[in-house]
Amino acid sequence: MDRAQKEKVVEELGQIFESSGVVVVARYEGMTVAEMQDLRGRMRDAGGSVRVAKNRLAKIALEGKPNASLGDLLTGMTVLAYSEDPTAAARVVDKFVKDNKKLEVLGGAMGETALDPAGVKAVADMPSREELIAQIVSQIGAPAANIAGAVGAPASNIASILSTIEERAEAA
């Protein structure tokens, strides 16, 4: 790899570290090509990506970035899993680790916040953006439905009382 190629890789990695909602660093020692392809496929389906890069180039790309503490995790055979959705990459990696013990989560970053392996697990357990929006909408809509039911209830009660009186009058 010549100097121009290295500069291009450093620039690409810098973009990843700046624009991703979450970056997960994991050690993939012992994984087969098929297992790595499985991880890449799962990540692609979730809207994220997986990148294997030279640790030295990744450390250069991290210089001056808010999540520069990730550089301490970059030793050995490491892989970067990232996504714009703040939970997608963490969720996919967490699920993959349950199936494949060869992948070991070292930590990660969510914006400027550094994450340890437990932090990555906590991010994976968080609801996605779409799930949060759905929960908020349902909470906003619930009072309106309750009000509509309360407003309609007296009218239906009066109607049922009148109908009962009418039935008794007809029976008598």
Image (cartoon, rainbow, N blue to C red):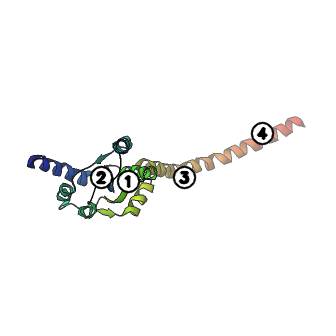
Give the amino acid type for the residue marked by disc 2 in the picture. Val
Q: Where is residue 171 in the image (x, y as percent from the top left)?
A: 88, 36
Residue closer to the observer: 112 or 35: 35
Q: Which of 22 and 29 is in front in this view?
A: 29
**Residue 163 numbered tag:** 4
Residue at horizontal 85 percent and vertical 39 percent from the top: 168
Residue 50: assigned label: none
Q: Which amino acid does label 3 sit on?
A: Pro
x then y, percent, for residue 45 = 38, 40
**Tag on residue 103?**
1
Distance of label 3 from label 4 (alpha carbons): 30 Å
Q: What element carries label 4?
A: helix
Marks 3 and 1: CB-CB under 8 Å? no
Sequence-wise, the earlier of marks 1 and 4 is: 1
**Mark 2 and mark 1 in contact (Cβ < 8 Å)?**
yes
Relative to 155, say whether 109 is above or below: below
Q: Which of marks 1 and 4 is in front?
A: 1
Is disc 4 surrounded by few (<14), some (14 to 19) or many (20+) residues within 10 Å?
Answer: few
User: Which of pointers 3 and 1 lies earlier in the amino acid sequence?
Assistant: 1
Badge 3 marks a residue whose secondary structure is helix
Q: Residue 143 carries which label?
A: 3
